[in-house]
Image (cartoon, grey):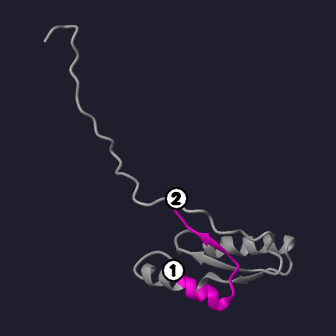
Amino acid sequence: MAKSEKEQYEVYWPRSPRQTQLKPLAKRPDTLSGKTVAQLWDFVYRGDEVFVLLEEGLRKRFPDVRFINWKEFGCTHGAGEREVVAALPGRFKELGVDAVISGMGC
């Protein structure tokens, strides 16, 4: 090989092709006033403390907001994760949930 020639190699992109298409976001409520907000938590990092603070702050802005505690739904991570997450749409409908705060600890 002459000095002016350069070796060339095929290169592969390390990521696979996208498997799902982007979907539009769900409609967001204009306000939390009079709404029911569910709390979800993966039991990993201080959600029990964080949700108390979130409730306090949101109640100052929206005194008539209603919260459904994370204890109502179970852990969204771990051995029972699939069952818990699969049950959420039905539980949300049953409880009249308008919005969700999902806490994840990393």
Task: For label 2, count other residues whose C-alpha is less than 10 Å away and answer few (under 14), some (14-19) or many (20+).
Answer: few
Q: For the residue labelled by badge 1, is the local secondary structure a helix, a strand or a loop?
A: loop
With 66 as the anchor, is 75 left or right in this view? Answer: left
- Of residue 58 and residue 85, the one placed in the foreground of this image is 85
The quarter of the picture where the N terminus appears is: top left
Residue at 62% x, 64% y is: 25
Q: Position of residue 18 (x, y in %)?
A: 41, 54
One can see residue 9 in this view: yes
The range drawn in magenta is 88-106
Which of disc 1 and disc 2 is earlier in sequence? 2
- Of residue 45 and residue 68, the one placed in the foreground of this image is 68
With 88 as the anchor, is 34 left or right in this view? Answer: right
Amino acid type indicated by mark 1: Cys
| Residue positioned most to the left | 1
Query: In the drawing, what numbered circle is on residue 75?
Result: 1
One can see residue 72 in this view: no
Q: According to the image, label 2 marks what residue?
A: 22
Task: For label 1, count other residues whose C-alpha is less than 10 Å away and answer few (under 14), some (14-19) or many (20+).
Answer: some
With 25 as the anchor, is 61 left or right in this view? Answer: right
Amino acid type indicated by mark 2: Leu
Tell me where residue 5 sits by quadrant: top left
